[in-house]
Every structure is written in structure tokens, then in C-alpha cells.
Image (cartoon, rainbow, N blue to C red):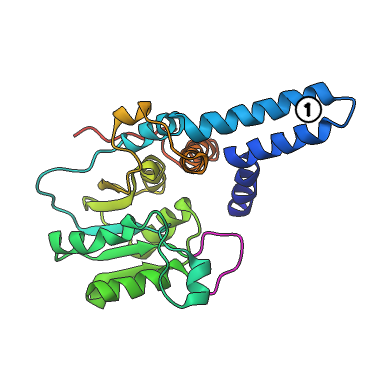
Amino acid sequence: MFFVLSKIGFFFIQPSNALVFFGGLGAVLLWSRWSRFGRWLCGLSLLGLAVCGLSPAANVLILPLEERFPRPEGQLDIDGIIVLGGSLDTIVMGERKAPALTSAAERLTIVPRLARQFPDVPIIHTGGHGLLTPAKASEADGASALFEDFGLPSDRVILEDKSRNTYQNALFTKRLINPEPGQKWLLVTSAYHMPRSIGVFRKVGWTGLVAYPVDWRTRGWEDTKLGFSGVSNGLKRFDIAAREWIGLAVYWVSGRTSALFPAPEPV
């Protein structure tokens, strides 16, 4: 139920959808006795589209998420690699019968490098099907095919194929792996998604997590002064950042994360 409500709820509060809705409502009200309020809504919608789509607002919103967990440096001693789903389009895969990567593809394309860097540890991919609409394939199917193409031995790969959101990623993977106290696990996901992921994994009892962010959308804090050349580009990034901040708040209220804005543990 939480999964369904979260998907439906975010559809309505997603900034780009909300701005279009307010603009449409304003246009309808122009032909009523509330025309003044309609003009106000239309103006607000256009202003919001301009600010979210063209200004640096999206970068300002996403940068605190991306900068929260730096990539580890130096020699690491780990017991396994966990790769979060979200980088495969299960709808397209089901019809095309081939892996279809999303804009978060680096979650998977980084795996060959990590497999060479840590040659003796298992690689766990966690992800089933994260959409409300049915699909004929799971993310595990696509990950399995790609890992085979990468040349990874099948005995190194563990696939978790039931999870539909970040909380289930953490819970189902923990049940599957049953990590031992004192072990260290590399957690791979998009940099903007890392705070919520770490918080959720900690909440279900994982210890010894080492954040390994990938898929950055910004260069760094200098991008707080950088706008966008197209409204669609800025809106897409603004939606991604807004989803993570809303997700952090909802997970915190519902008891699914260890902190409102998880941070690296003291060394």
C-alpha cells in the first residue's frame, strides 16, 4: 500500500505536474467569475516553469544531496558490493527483450571497474519492478544480461528481484544476504539518491556501509550559478531533486530511515 500511495502521491505533487495543473486550472478560471484568481494562477505557473526550468534552482536543490556522501578514497577492504536498481527501463525491456538503460545507467556501468578492483567479493543487484504499470521483465533480468556481457562469473552475482522501492531494496537484500557484524559493504547508487539509501539501509539494521556514489548530475557548487538552456532539462532535474527531498521527509515520518538527512558516520 505504501508503494502505491507514494507513486500516486508524487504524481500530483511532482513540481512539473503541479505547475501544469495550476496553469490549466488558472486558464479554466479565466472564463468564470474567479477570472482574477485564474490570472494569478496562470502567472504563478509560468513563473514557476521559468524558475524551475531555466534558473539554477534545480542545481541548488540537488547539490546538497549529491555532496552529502563523498566517494571513498584509498585502499578499501570490503566484503561485498550492493548495486541499487533504478537504471533499467523494465517496460521497454519487456517488449524489446534487451536491457534498456535509463539516465541512471552509471549504477550498472561502474560494476566492471568495481569487479576488477575487488575481485574476490560478491556483487548483489537489488531491484524488481518499480512502476505501477505491469511489465514483462524485471530489473534483475536486465542486470543479469548485462553482468553476463561484462564477463562476470555467475557465482559472483546475486540478484534480488522482488523489491519495488528503496526500503524494499534494503530489507529484502538484508534478508537475502544476512550480513555478519563487522562486515563492510559497498553501496552503489546515484549521488543524489545516496542520503536516502544510506538512511534506509541503516534503519533495517545494516552496519559497515561504505557509500560509493555515481551518476552525478552536477560538477559541484559552482553549478549553483548555472542555469539551463531548455525548460525540459531544468524541470527534469528539479523533479529528481524534489522527489528525493520529499522521499526523505516521507521516509522519516513513516519510520523508514535512520535520520531526516543521513550523514557519513564519523571515522
**Chief secondary structure of the magenta span?**
loop
Q: Nearer the viewer, residue 143 or 104?
A: 104
Identify the residue at the far front of this view: 229
Identify the residue at the far right of this view: 33
**Residue under the image location 66 percent in, 39 percent down:** 20
The vertical placement of 65 against 178, above or below, is above
Write down the quadrant of residue 195 in the picture: top left
The N terminus lies in quadrant:
bottom right
The C terminus lies in quadrant:
top left
Q: Position of residue 106 (x, y in %)?
A: 31, 56
Q: Position of residue 240 (x, y in %)?
A: 47, 43
Res 262 visible: yes
Left or right of 46? Residue 257 is left
- Mark 1 Cα-neighbour bin, 10 Å: few <14, some 14–19, many ≥20: many
Q: Is residue 220 magenta?
A: no
Which region of the structure is painted magenta?
Answer: 129-137
Q: Which residue is mark 1?
A: 38
Q: Position of residue 162 (x, y in %)?
A: 48, 66
Write down the quadrant of residue 193 in the picture: top left
Q: Is residue 132 magenta?
A: yes
Q: Position of residue 105 (x, y in %)?
A: 36, 58
In terms of secondary structure, where does tag 1 sit? helix
**Residue under the image location 59 percent in, 47 percent down:** 6
**Residue under the image location 46 percent in, 78 percent down:** 97
